[in-house]
Image: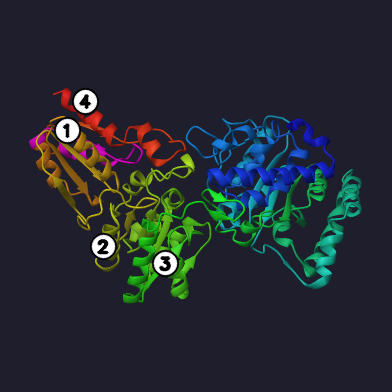
């Protein structure tokens, strides 16, 4: 069926289409991996949206966007779904370069209403005619940005529709059977038709408008005494709901009505995460982000790779908590992902999950530290970006001893450019007093976390990658700079697991007859320049390899320090450059960007060849 034919579907055809979409998504994700439970939960919502709106013209803004698989199928990308999240294939998130029906890139949470309001206001300014919708989940409402957008959108008067996908958290409070009965009555077609007719009649003149205001105020007083729906209406929205999010026929009618209202509307939809696939319904967390799995058994095709940096962090936190009663852990809706599930189980009074609210988490970390607690905030690098102001204002300004456990630092693979942790080196380095440790092995992570908790003062960040350790499994130190090997022809410098890549490059260079010095940075701030200066005076050539963007990279600091110290050196930087890196496996992306062992070797050969 073509997208332009969705509006002509019968309700029965729509229900059949929903079933077909679920089957195809389950089959696809079982092979490619991806975000399954969230995508299964919004199938009827997306089919209803496509029945009512033309998304080549109308704008649908996803929040987070990992629930967009049905939308991709509905917009002609079914034949490419086998490439989902693969290098050069379909993204797991909305991408306008894939389809005009993808209105906006989405990868982080809580911004959809703000973006949608911007689009609606642009429509008004440009005197154009199209609809604007935002699809936001109850989880994203834990982020303060969502409420900033809602407050402005509701008071703006701009026609737009916010679809609140409520699949877990109770947003509203109803009291007893009377409230449930009234909520059903106010959603009946007869009621909605009468409400629309009443608004139309009373809006024709000043007298009618005055009557509407009085009766509306009286109705609201009665309703607020019985129903708990006043929050969104107080913001200025016409509230519709709650609605069964798996009744595609009724959802379609409600969206048509919401479109006709021509004002800010919030449609509250109740859904089941993982709907239509029993294993995902039973364990939505396990099927939120999942690798390839056996559809019949609902089990992963291959078991997880065992110990990783996140699990080592969690284990060490539990050990430290036994010794330090003041130690507390904070996460922003990433308890499992950051390895804190066991800490949360064993120390529930010292564990705080603040929801998708990284800025709040950083500020709270400052408050905890100020009053004598030992706070450790575990956060993905890509999400820490949203706490930058609080790092400066609420931690560094008072030199408070809070620890940032920066997980997923560097390239993360198939989630792509919205999730790579490649900016934290640059922005953390701008914060006065910030100390940044970079473990390359599990042993170093354990030692650095203990050192940060027990011996350091002021703000500390410990950045480590997704997944397990590589070639380097040793313990070089908890800070400073370590010389792994001496050499006379060229000096290679790296930190974190990029040490593996420079060691590979060193082997390739040695096979070509070159003597290579290898330097490992345990800390990139403060930066111990002594060993680097000594080796560069000997070799006269320097390569700094990093898995981060060029702007604000450590290599530029090193070259600047050498120049200021009057050390002549021929230098080259090997990093991700000034670009957003696409999706793909980490090894593919390293090869593409030239930061793997072969790429570092090639760059070093060029420097050596130039004298």
Q: Is label 3 or label 1 in front?
A: 1
Seen at 32% across and 64% down, the residue is 401
Q: CA distance from mark 3 to mark 4?
A: 47 Å
Quadrant of the image occupied by residue 128: top right
State the separation of the CA atoms marked 1 and 2. 34 Å
Which circle's residue, 3 or 2, is located before the other in the chain? 3
Q: Which mark is drawn over residue 511?
A: 1
Disc sitting over residue 447 in the figure: 2
Of label 3 and label 1, which has the lower sequence position?
Answer: 3
Q: Nearer the viewer, mark 1 or mark 2?
A: 1
Residue stretch in magenta: 538-563
Q: CA distance from mark 4 to mark 2?
A: 37 Å
Residue 454 in picture, x, y percent from top left: 27, 68
Q: Nearer the viewer, mark 3 or mark 2?
A: 2
- Kindly indicate whether the residue at mark 2 contacts the one at mark 3 (C-beta within 8 angstroms): no
Check contact, mark 3 vs mark 4: CB within 8 A: no
Quickly name the residue at label 3: 329
> Which quarter shows the N terminus?
top right
Say what secondary structure mark 2 lies in: helix
In front of the other: 456 or 206: 456
């Amino acid at each position: 069926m073509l997208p332009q034919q969705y509006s002509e579907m019968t309700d029965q055809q729509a229900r059949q289409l929903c079933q077909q979409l679920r089957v195809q998504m389950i089959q696809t994700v079982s092979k490619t991996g991806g975000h399954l439970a969230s995508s299964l939960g919004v199938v009827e919502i997306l089919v209803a949206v496509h029945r009512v709106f033309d998304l080549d013209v109308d704008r649908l803004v996803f929040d987070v966007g990992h629930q967009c698989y049905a939308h991709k199928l509905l917009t002609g990308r079914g034949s490419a779904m086998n490439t989902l999240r693969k290098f050069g294939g379909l993204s797991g998130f909305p991408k306008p370069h894939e389809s005009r029906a993808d209105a906006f890139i989405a990868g982080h949470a809580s911004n959809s209403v703000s973006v949608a309001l911007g689009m609606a206001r642009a429509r008004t300014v440009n005197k154009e005619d199209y609809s604007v919708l935002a699809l936001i989940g109850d989880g994203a409402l834990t982020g303060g940005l969502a409420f900033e957008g809602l407050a402005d959108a509701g008071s703006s008067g701009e026609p737009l529709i916010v679809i609140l996908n409520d699949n877990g958290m109770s947003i509203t409070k109803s009291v007893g059977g009377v409230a449930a009965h009234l909520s059903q009555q106010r959603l009946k077609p007869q009621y909605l038709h009468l409400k629309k007719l009443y608004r139309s009649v009373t809006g024709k003149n000043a007298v009618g408008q005055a009557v509407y205001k009085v009766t509306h105020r009286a109705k609201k007083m009665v309703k607020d005494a019985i129903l708990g729906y006043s929050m969104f209406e107080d913001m200025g929205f016409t509230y519709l709901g709650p609605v069964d999010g798996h009744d595609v026929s009724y959802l379609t009618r409600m969206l048509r009505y919401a479109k006709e209202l021509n004002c800010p509307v919030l449609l509250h939809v109740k859904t089941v995460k993982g709907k239509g696939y029993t294993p995902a319904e039973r364990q939505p967390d396990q099927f939120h982000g999942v690798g390839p799995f056996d559809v019949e058994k609902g089990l992963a095709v291959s078991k997880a790779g065992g110990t990783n940096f996140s699990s080592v962090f969690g284990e060490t936190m539990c050990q430290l908590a036994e010794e330090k009663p003041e130690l507390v852990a904070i996460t922003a809706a990433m308890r499992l992902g950051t390895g804190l599930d066991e800490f949360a189980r064993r120390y529930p009074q010292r564990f705080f999950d603040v929801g998708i609210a990284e800025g709040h988490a950083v500020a709270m970390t400052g408050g905890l530290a100020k009053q004598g607690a030992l706070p450790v905030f575990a956060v993905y690098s890509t999400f820490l970006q949203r706490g930058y102001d609080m790092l400066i204002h609420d931690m560094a300004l008072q030199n408070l001893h809070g620890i940032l456990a920066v997980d997923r630092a560097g390239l993360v693979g198939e989630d792509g450019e919205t999730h790579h942790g490649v900016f934290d080196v640059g922005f953390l380095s701008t914060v006065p007093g910030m100390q940044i440790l970079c473990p390359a092995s599990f042993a170093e992570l354990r030692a650095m976390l203990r050192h940060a908790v027990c011996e350091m003062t002021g703000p500390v960040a410990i950045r480590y990658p997704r997944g397990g350790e590589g070639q380097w499994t040793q313990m070089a130190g908890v800070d400073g700079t370590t010389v792994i090997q001496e050499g006379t022809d060229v000096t290679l410098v790296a930190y974190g697991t990029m040490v593996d890549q420079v060691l590979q490059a060193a082997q390739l260079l040695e096979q070509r007859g070159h003597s290579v010095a290898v330097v490992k940075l345990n800390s990139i701030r403060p930066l111990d320049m002594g060993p680097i200066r000594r080796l560069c005076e000997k070799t006269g050539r320097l390569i700094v390899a990093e898995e981060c963007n060029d702007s604000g990279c450590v290599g530029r600091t090193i070259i600047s320090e050498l120049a200021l110290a009057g050390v002549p050196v021929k230098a080259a930087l090997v990093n991700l450059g000034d670009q957003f890196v696409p999706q793909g496996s980490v090894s593919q992306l390293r090869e593409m960007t030239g930061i793997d062992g072969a790429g570092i070797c090639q760059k070093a050969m060029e420097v050596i060849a130039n004298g």
